[in-house]
Image: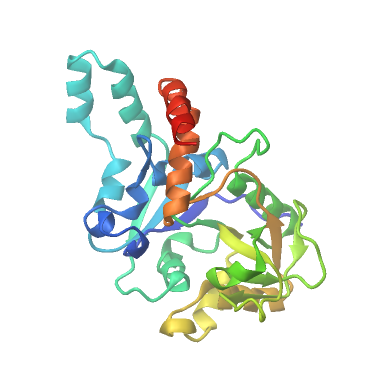
Amino acid sequence: MQKAAIKKVVIPVAGLGTRSLPFTKVVPKELVPVLSTPTIHFIVEEVVAAGIEQVIFVTSSGKTALEDYFDVNHALVRTLRERGKEDLAACVEKTSQLCEVISVRQKEPLGLGHAVLCAAPVIGGEPFAVALGDEIFPPWDPKAPQSPLAVLAEQASKTAASVIGVMKVPRERTASYGIVDVGAAEVGTTPVPVKATVEKPRPEKAPSEYAIVGRYAFGPEILDCLKSIKPGIGGEIQLTDAMSALAAEGSLYASAVQGCRYDMGSLLGYVSAQIDAGLREPSIAGPLKDYLRTLL
């Protein structure tokens, strides 16, 4: 029996953005741009491409700029049109029309699992997605015709279970990720059952080399798991602990995500995204290639 289609996504954006300081002292990390497009814009476009209609931001103090970005700015649009900048005016208007945005507050930094729980009153008893605000999958990879969330949401509906996105990483990097235990299985684009999830295990303790990326398609059962688990590492409510509980019930699967992925919280990910986007932007691609040749 298929589950209902996912129409809501939780995007936790309450973090301090410590990896991107000092810029994020005054600007939310989710507004860090790739060329002129903020990180969060790519994520919301991915959400919309997946057929999701409602975005739930889990915010904290100082994050109102995210809501403003997706709000209507009549004065700006009017000024742009008065100056003959119709293309820019249309671009600004389109941003405010992408989707419905709702914000809830996470008043204490008690972990990713706690952030998801903060959205529970809006989620209700429906299936929902989660997209982390510092990972982007821009729509420029021809090998990935569908967005990761669209694929995961479809798989979750077909399997009547929760499906999380994973990618293979070098074993020496497992301590930087949540890792899934899938036994001897190879994870491809067909979901495989997850036995357990482990938060940032040392390489010698890691059950596999499959790391959880920031895209998830959950049934509402994950909320019950989050409510019942005890605080884990750092005294926080860990989403990985709740997923382990879900896996123990046979209700969690992993699927390999496809396409370009950038971790915008890391310097390498940030710079890589700028270069790749620049090489795809017709107005600067030629001069940028020439400049890169002089460096190499």
Note whether 114 is above or below 59 in the view shown: below
Residue 11 sits in quarter: bottom left
The coloring applied to the image is: rainbow
- Determine the residue positioned at 43% across, 39% down: 274
Horizontal side of residue 26 vs 56, given as left or right: left
Note whether 269 is above or below 200 in the view shown: above
Q: Position of residue 136 (x, y in %)?
A: 50, 47
Q: Position of residue 153 (x, y in %)?
A: 63, 51
- Determine the residue positioned at 44% across, 31% down: 294
Horizontal side of residue 96 vs 144, given as left or right: left
> Is residue 69 visible from the viewing direction of this image?
yes
- Comparing 128 with 24, the one in front is 24
Note whether 206 is above or below 8 in the view shown: below
The single residue placed furthest to the top in the displayed view is: 84
- Comparing 224 with 79, the one in front is 79
Q: Position of residue 127 (x, y in %)?
A: 58, 59
Q: Position of residue 93 (x, y in %)?
A: 32, 28
Image quadrant for the N terminus?
Answer: bottom right
Horizontal side of residue 230 vs 153, given as left or right: left
> Is residue 264 visible from the viewing direction of this image?
no
How many marks on residues? 0
The single residue placed furthest to the right in the displayed view is: 184
